[in-house]
Image (cartoon, rainbow, N blue to C red):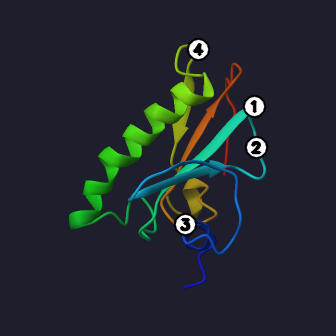
Amino acid sequence: MDCIFCKIANKEIPSDIVFENEKVIAFRDINPVAPVHILVIPKAHVESVQALEGEDYNLLPDIFKAIKEIAVKEGIDKSGYRVISNSGKDGGQEVFHLHFHILGGENIGKLRCK
């Protein structure tokens, strides 16, 4: 499989990892659109929210626990942050591996991310 996020999860491509456990890995976006811009992904390949099936749903609690922990670690838990997951081409998804953007560190207003 030629998925860049799978390669990051498998440590084939270096990244600035901020969180990792058995099922989830999170790293800083290489093209941040906010002072804090972190991507949270399941280590298992799932294409998008729309592609979730069966056991895939069991990944979501781990992903959201990671998001909460990362927000505290990054110091944005009190000021606030945005969590975004784009699904499909028309939804703005560019990497077809389920991922959640954590954006924070400033008032992000109408900020968009890919």
Provide the secondary structure element on which disc 3 rests: helix
Kindly identify the residue that appears in the image at 30 percent across and 45 percent down.
Answer: 61
Which residue position holds label 4? 79
| Residue corresponding to mark 2 | 32
106 lies left or right of 99: right
Rounded to the nearest angstrom, the CA distance separating label 3 from label 2 is 19 Å
Q: Give the residue drawn at x 70%, y 59%.
A: 15
* Residue denoted by label 1: 35
108 vs 57, nearest the viewer = 57
Mark 3 or mark 2, earlier in chain: 3
Mark 2 Cα within 10 Å, few/some/many (few <14, many 20+)? Answer: few
Q: Nearer the viewer, mark 1 or mark 3?
A: 3
- Three-letter code, disc 4: Ser
Q: Are marks 2 and 1 in contact (CB under 8 Å)?
A: yes
Residue at image point 25% right, 55% down? 58
In the depicted structure, whether residue 27 falls above or below residue 52: above
- Marked residue nearer the N-terminal end (1 or 3): 3
Quadrant position of the N terminus in the picture: bottom right
